[in-house]
Amino acid sequence: MTTNRPSLTTAAMNFRITRVCLILTAVSWTIASVAMAAPYTFMSVSGTNVPGNGIAVSTFTSGLSNGFITVDHNSTTPNSLGNWGAQDNINAAINPSVFATLFPGSGNVQGHLAQSMYGDPNPPAGFPAPVPNVTTVTFDLTTYTGYLPKLAFGIWNTTTEVGAPVYNVQLMNASNVIGSPSMVNILGNDDNTGTGGVLGLHQMIFAPSSGDITFNNAILHNGGIHTDALFFDGIPTGTKQIIVTATLPALNNLGDGVGYYFAETPEPSTFVLAGLGLLGLTASACRRRKLKTRMARIHA
């Protein structure tokens, strides 16, 4: 029986082609992987620096040319202490913030500070008990032009001194219907280690099914204050607003300061598409070459 074997020249050529295919595939994967692993870019924040109720008291601006997000504050609860604390809308009080674990490489970032007053310990006439102070912080997403499902939203430092839940998050959809954010994806928790931040005493817990924010009773950091931060994405396309409501019982005359953040990722660039395209072409070319080699051996 005669066995057909490729010549030494053919074998060497096939080896070189295989090696080239492997190198090109590795290069293509590297290009695609590096480009697709784009870091988050936190939106910058500017504001009026005036505490209290107001429309567009602060504005998040995209660094990726995706428009902006305005922030409104509102509260009408009777409260002799006022509805908002002295540092409400003073964003510099929490800047810079740093969330290095969830967002490595993002460095110093900016956030919005909303400081809701606790409830009135001296109920006004006609109220049988101290009145919880109810505030809403509303983020208007209609002027944001990026891809909402990839926009990360963060909340940091909610109170742990008056029980839970006292904070709740709801979304307004394209039909103006307000409901729980049951479809969002929790990215995780992180401590704010920036000079404008403080470590959390407890870990924040967020329940998308209801929108309620609570906390883990276990001590996260001795000497910490309130909670760490929690970020989520997966906001449905067409969402008009993120609405955060605080219902705070009586405690002190300082209020509860909470930080809010937005971080975005760039859309797939030409560089990403080129890397993926090169990967596909390389794989296709190598498969065709292998097929030709096999066919040549069969018919040799």
Image: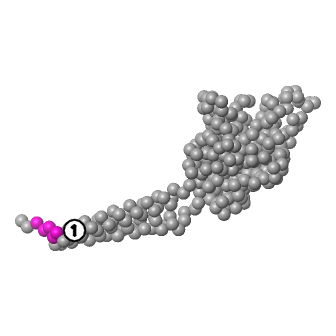
- The amino acid type, in three-letter code, at marker 1 is Ala
Q: Residue at x 63, y 41 (%)?
A: 193
Q: Which residues are magenta?
A: 3-8
Q: Identify the residue position indicated by label 1 in the image.
A: 12
User: Residue 269 appears at what percent x and percent y?
Assistant: 54, 65
281 w.r.t. 98: above or below? below
SS category of the residue bearing label 1: helix
291 w.r.t. 84: above or below? below
Question: Quick check: 3 left or right of 80?
Answer: left
Q: Residue at x 63, y 46 (%)?
A: 98
- On the question of residue 158 being in view, the answer is yes
Question: Quick check: 39 left or right of 4?
Answer: right
Q: Residue at x 75, y 47 (%)?
A: 91
Give the image quarter of residue 208: top right
66 w.r.t. 137: above or below? below
Q: Residues within 10 Å of mark 1 (few under 14, many from 20)?
A: few
Q: Nearer the viewer, residue 232 or 27?
A: 27
Query: Residue most toward the front?
Result: 195
Q: Residue at x 46, y 65 (%)?
A: 275
User: Residue 121 appears at what percent x and percent y?
Assistant: 85, 29
Magenta: main secondary structure equals loop
Colour theme = one colour
Tell me, yes or no, whether the highlighted magenta stretch contains residue 53: no
Quadrant occupied by the N terminus: bottom left
User: Residue 61 appears at what percent x and percent y?
Assistant: 70, 58
Query: Residue most toward the right?
Result: 125
Give the image quarter of residue 159: top right
Q: Nearer the viewer, residue 107 or 55?
A: 107
Give the image quarter of residue 217: top right
